[in-house]
């Protein structure tokens, strides 16, 4: 506080302190405004929901809201299940109101990290072929990268056997490919 008064002078320091208090301390240490998805979230409401005593939020604070990601990390499944470290390393939430903090470049993504190696006809497909999902009748579709079901072929593909044969397609396809190679 003494250095602030010395630098700004008493009058200007009072103005800065009033502004700081009126914004609940938000301008004291932030690198920028909070992203809209967090700023508009009624659960957040105040800095101390995520931050503790002028420190960066621990991943536990993020995962208390982002429960699907938390479950994937617990199960060690999907892309996030293989990660270690802090959420903020990839997702800086003070990057500005309009920032997209998903930090996801589909052209550089290694599908092996998501427990789904692209093989065969899947290799050349645009991402949206598999990741564009219908949400409901009002929202036609949205891109979804987390929580897609891909255990069985008929999770995505129509069953050409109409339920008359086991849905363990991957095993049958691998056997058929081996037979063709022999």
Image: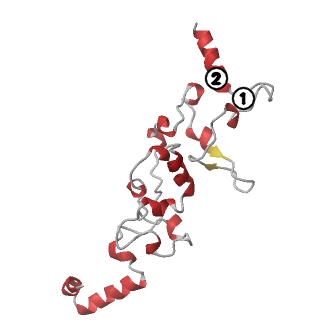
Look at the numbered disc 2 and give the secondary structure of its residue. Answer: helix
Q: Position of residue 34 (x, y in %)?
A: 45, 68
Q: Position of residue 156 (x, y in %)?
A: 68, 36
Q: Is residue 151 left or right of residue 16?
A: right
Q: CA distance from mark 1 to mark 2?
A: 9 Å
Q: Quadrant of residue 161?
A: top right
Answer whether labels 1 and 2 touch (C-beta < 8 Å).
no
**Along the line of sight, which residue is nearer the eye, 57 or 126?**
57
Kindly identify the residue that appears in the image at 69 percent across and 55 percent down: 139
**Along the line of sight, which residue is nearer the eye, 15 or 49?**
49
Kindly identify the residue that appears in the image at 44 percent across and 51 percent down: 103
Q: Where is the C terminus found, in terms of image quarters? A: top right
Q: Quadrant of residue 18?
A: bottom left
Would you name the residue on which mark 2 appears? 171
**Along the line of sight, which residue is nearer the eye, 98 or 64?**
64
Would you name the residue on which mark 1 appears? 167
Kindly identify the residue that appears in the image at 76 percent across and 26 percent down: 160
Q: Quadrant of residue 66?
A: bottom right
Q: Position of residue 111 (x, y in %)?
A: 50, 36
Circle 1 crowding by C-alpha within 10 Å: few under 14, some 14–19, many from 20: some
């Amino acid at each position: 506080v003494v250095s602030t008064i010395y630098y700004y002078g008493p009058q200007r320091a009072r103005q800065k302190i009033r502004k700081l208090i009126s914004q609940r301390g938000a301008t004291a240490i932030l690198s920028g405004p909070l992203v809209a998805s967090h700023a508009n979230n009624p659960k957040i409401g105040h800095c101390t929901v995520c931050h503790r005593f002028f420190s960066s939020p621990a991943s536990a604070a993020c995962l208390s809201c982002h429960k699907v990601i938390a479950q994937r990390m617990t199960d060690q499944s999907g892309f996030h299940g293989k990660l270690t470290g802090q959420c903020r390393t990839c997702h800086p939430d003070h990057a500005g109101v309009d920032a997209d903090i998903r930090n996801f470049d589909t052209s550089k993504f290694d599908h092996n990290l998501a427990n789904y190696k692209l093989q065969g006809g899947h290799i050349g497909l645009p991402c949206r072929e598999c990741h564009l999902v219908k949400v409901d009748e009002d929202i036609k579709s949205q891109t979804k990268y987390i929580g897609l079901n891909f255990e069985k072929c008929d999770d995505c593909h129509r069953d050409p056997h109409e339920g008359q044969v086991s849905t363990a397609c991957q095993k049958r396809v691998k056997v058929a490919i081996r037979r063709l190679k022999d």
